[in-house]
């Protein structure tokens, strides 16, 4: 199978993704995905997306059972003007 964006040969891969649900951060490991090494695009089967939704819904109800990661939340403090970088 080839990437619809860049035409490179894609690979099957398990990935880790972050999802926010009602203020709680869930990190899901082992999600089956199709990855493009050419442009870093990641594709998910519809069934996988449905299962992610169902898993998050279930886990949100059972939050006590989830392993809890301690994640530092830091602020970007400097005042920087937002400009679009010029590409040569
Ligand atoms: Zn691609």
Image (cartoon, grey):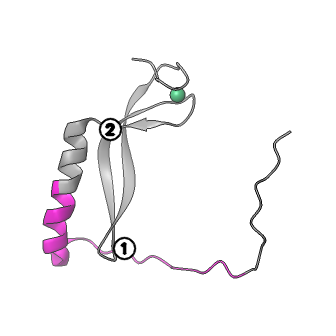
Q: Nearer the viewer, residue 81 or 46?
A: 81
Q: Quadrant of residue 42?
A: top left
Give the mark toward the camera: 1 or 2: 2
Which residues fall within the magenta stretch? 54-77
Q: Nearer the viewer, residue 41 or 11?
A: 41
Identified at 38% across, 45% down, the residue is 15
SS for callout 1: loop
Q: Is residue 68 above or below residue 51?
A: below
Q: Position of residue 72 (x, y in %)?
A: 50, 79
**Residue drawn at 51 percent across, 79 percent down:** 73
Residue at (19% x, 75% y) in the render? 63
Where residue 39 appears, x then y in whole percent?
57, 32
Q: Is residue 16 above or below residue 12?
A: below
Ligand 1 is within 8 Å of the C-beta of the residue at disc 2: no
| Mark 1 to mark 2 CA distance (whole Å) | 25 Å
Relative image position of residue 2 (x, y in whole percent): 44, 18
Label ID, residue 44: 2
Number of callouts = 2
Quadrant location, the C terminus: top right
Q: Quadrant of the N terminus?
A: top left
Determine crowd level at label 2: few under 14, some 14-19, many 20+ residues with C-alpha closer than 10 A: few
Q: Which residue is mark 1?
A: 69
Q: Residues within 10 Å of mark 1 (few under 14, many from 20)?
A: few
- Labels 1 and 2: the sequence-earlier one: 2
Label of residue 84 in the image:
none
């Amino acid at each position: 199978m080839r990437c619809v964006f860049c035409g490179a040969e894609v690979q099957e891969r398990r990935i880790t993704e972050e999802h926010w649900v009602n203020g709680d951060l869930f990190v899901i490991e082992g999600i089956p995905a199709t990855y493009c090494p050419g442009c870093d695009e990641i594709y998910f089967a519809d069934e996988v997306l449905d299962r992610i939704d169902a898993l998050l819904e279930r886990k949100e109800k059972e939050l006590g059972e989830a392993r809890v990661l301690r994640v530092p939340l830091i602020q970007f403090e400097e005042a920087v003007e937002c400009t679009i970088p010029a590409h040569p």
